[in-house]
Amino acid sequence: MFKFVFSLIMAGTLMLPVHSFAASKTVFGEIERVLATPADKWGGCLVRTTAKYGVLNCSKLWLSLDCEGAVEGNTKSAGQRRFDLATLAVLTERRVKLRIFDNVKLNGYCYADQVELLPTN
């Protein structure tokens, strides 16, 4: 009887869903630096943020906003608007909300498809 119950417990344990890491995360922080890059590198623009996104597989300190429209579904103008908002955040010292993807990378840098300038408190 013990072997039967033990087998049922083990079978039930094996059927539990395996935890997987998120492919995207929404984070809050400040933009420390902005960097316009050559068109063929890192999507044409990068930002460095104070936001913590440790659960994502992003090993670098910078994020690409894809100002060149290299990511499928993104456009050059949308990437440049995100970069403009990041630059405005630096100039006004305002916090931002970013949505970061670790399954989309540009030359090793994770991609952020959303930049929202947050209101001042």
Image (cartoon, rainbow, N blue to C red):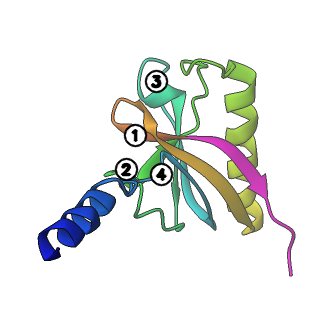
First in sequence: mark 3 vs mark 4:
4
* Residue identified by numbered label 4: 22
Residue 12 numbered mark, or none: none
The majority secondary structure of the magenta stretch comes to: strand
Q: Quadrant of residue 119?
A: bottom right
**Residue 109, percent across and down?**
40, 40
Q: Nearer the viewer, mark 3 or mark 4?
A: 4
Given this view, does label 3 or label 2 mark the residue nearer the observer?
2
Amino acid type of disc 3? Answer: Pro
Q: Is residue 64 magenta?
A: no
Disc 3 is placed on an element classified as loop
Mark 4 → mark 2, Cα distance in angstroms: 12 Å
Task: Name which of mark 4 and mark 2 comes first in the sequence.
Answer: 4
**Is 115 in the magenta?**
yes
Q: Does residue 7 lie above or below 24 as drawn?
A: below
Is there CB contact under 8 Å for labels 1 and 2?
A: yes
Q: Which residue is mark 3?
A: 38
The residue beneath circle 2 is 58
Residue shown at 47% from the left, 51% from the top: 22
Vertical placement of 114 versus 106: above or below? below
Of the numbered discs 1 and 3, the one sitting upstream in the chain is 3
Q: Which residues are magenta?
A: 112-121
Q: Which residue is mark 1?
A: 109
Q: Choose between 116 and 93: the one closer to the eye.
A: 116
19 over 104 or under it: above or below: below
Amino acid type indicated by mark 4: Ala
